[in-house]
Amino acid sequence: MHLYHIGLVIMAAVLWGISGGIAGILMDKGWSPIVISFYRGAIGFVGIFVWLLLHRRGNKGEYSSKAVKWSIVAGFAVACNFSFYFLSISESGVAIASTLMYTAPLFVLFSSFLFRIETVTPFKVIAMVIVMVGISLLTNVYEAGIGSLNIFGIMSGLLSGLSYALFIFGLKNASKEGRPPFVLTVAFATFTIVMFLLIDHKEALDVMFSEDLIWFVTLGIIGAGISFYLYIEGLKKTSASVAAIIAMVEPVTASLFGLVILGEVLTVTQSIGLVIILITITILSTKQK
């Protein structure tokens, strides 16, 4: 693995964190999270599809059935991740839902060991555990209380994490078979179709005539187009387990976005969690090089 490719994964996660901040602004304006997610993927699809048309090649191998299959898996997994995440928020709150979604490295690490995809080292396990502790502190999950827990909320949160892990494997396998423009076009097309079945179509139409349209476009460009391209390029030389752990810089970026842009305040405990995540990811990235 090269530090360059690890850096691409980190940059993608940073852009995802910024996207979370933009989505937060739109939700504060009253827009549904499902509609926001739909436009994020749909605008990303349009941008990547135009890029694909402008950079077509004669090599038919990049359009193989394997590339299509894994791209569809990746797109469907992202749609499931968003859907289960929002269900978990509605049942258990943001703190618990966020923590459960970021159990994705656990699923990736377990799958890697089970199917012998890559070597699972003690260092990776320790790094994953430390990052999970940092996530718990950053999201203040310990303050949620027993009353916030319910089986449906927990299951939805774990399924969002499992979907996140499936997305990583899908995108990594697809990138081995086809070029990023084609892979992302198929993945985003799948995502857009699935999410279109779930959204409030009237609200989605209202977006087109809203003054917030520029926010939706920005979200799609940053949170889907550019970020996913960086991520798929980074995955080429980065193992799935390491990519899953490194991508946990996303909630850190979202927290810093809220601190700097939205004027939110981080508690001492949250700050400690943030520092823990950053230090662990830095050490892991350096060691993997």
Image: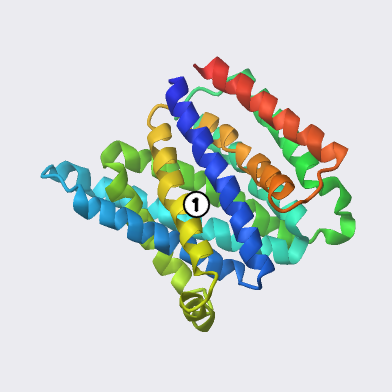
| Left or right of 269 in this view: 203 | left
State the residue in front, 102 or 117.
102
Instruction: Quadrant for residue 246, please give it.
Output: top right
Task: Check disc 1 and report its element: helix, strand or loop.
Answer: helix
Residue displayed at 47% across by 80% down: 205
Q: Is residue 74 above or below residue 245?
A: below
Q: Position of residue 223 (x, y in %)?
A: 49, 52
Residue in view at x 55 percent, y 36 percent: 244
Assign the N terminus to one quadrant of the image. top left
Q: Looking at the picture, which amino acid does disc 1 mark?
A: Gly
Image quadrant in which you'd find residue 60: top left
State the image quarter where residue 155 is shown.
bottom right
Q: Residue furthest left?
A: 58
* Numbered disc total: 1
Q: Which residue is mark 1?
A: 223
Q: Is residue 115 visible?
A: no
Residue 21 lies, with reference to residue 105, above or below; the image says: below
Residue at image point 44% right, 58% down: 76
- Could you classify mark 1 by the number of other residues whose Cα lies within 10 Å: few (under 14), some (14-19), or many (20 or more)? many
Answer above or below: position of 112 versus 70. Answer: above
* Side of 161 relative to 138 (left or right): left
Estimate the x, y position of residue 261 in percent, counting from the top left.
68, 50
Residue farthest along the bottom direction in this orientation: 202
